[in-house]
Amino acid sequence: MAPPPESVGFSVDNLERVFRESHAAVFRAAYRVTGNASDAEDALQTVFLRLLKRDAAADAVENMPSFLRRAAVNAALDIVRSRQGIRNIPLDELEPVLAEPAHRRPDRLQASSEIRDWLRGALARLNPRIAQMFALRFFEGKDNPEIARLFNTTPGSVAVTISRTRDRLEKEYRVYQGGEA
């Protein structure tokens, strides 16, 4: 039986093709998490170096675009954590900020930038699995069933995790702004 069309087992031969087809999407996913082109480039390199080092006997990747986006988010979160010297400290969500366009008046642009910086730090403190789910949902626009498939769980579990994370991040953000939790 032939593997699915997006299924790929890695070798040096097909890595170049995968890179050409996917590097822009990997960069964008990493950039949304890091907010920094240099860090996104580092994440991009990390993702493809990990693919190159991947054990030839490992299972084939069933959905390459989703696999690479998840790998990019994970690598970007690792970079943000390392830059901030942060360990895994549980937190949770902040959806309205992500939906707001950044191209506003200068005062709104500054506020948006500060919120995004705060959110990046908050994501870096999350459990990696939770941070990945959150980033895939709100930065990459993936739906709960697709995230569930990537994490081998149920869409309901993803929905609960993301909802709790969003509620927690909103509380953390209110505290950060000097309000009450």
Image (cartoon, rainbow, N blue to C red):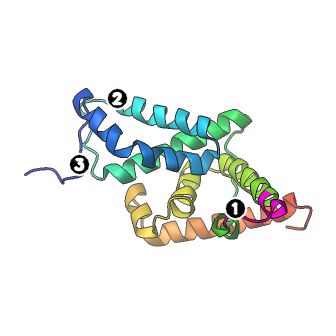
> Looking at the image, which residue is at 49% across and 44% down?
27
Q: Is residue 92 magenta?
A: no
Q: Residue 137 location in percent, x, y?
A: 52, 63
- Mark 2 → mark 1, Cα distance in angstroms: 36 Å
Q: Residue 152 location in percent, x, y?
A: 39, 58
Which image quarter: residue 149?
Answer: bottom left
According to the picture, the residue beneath numbered tag 3 turns out to be: 7
Q: What element does badge 1 sit on?
A: loop
Q: Residue 92 location in percent, x, y?
A: 68, 61
Q: Earlier in the sequence, mark 2 or mark 1?
A: 2
Report whether residue 73 is seen.
Answer: no
Task: Count neighbours of disc 3 (C-alpha within 10 A) and say few if under 14, some if 14 to 19, many if 20 or more.
Answer: some
Residue stretch in magenta:
101-109
According to the picture, the residue beneath numbered tag 1 turns out to be: 102
Amino acid at the residue labelled 1: Ala
Q: Earlier in the sequence, mark 3 or mark 1?
A: 3
Report whether residue 47 is seen.
Answer: yes
Q: Earlier in the sequence, mark 3 or mark 2?
A: 3
According to the picture, the residue beneath numbered tag 2 turns out to be: 52
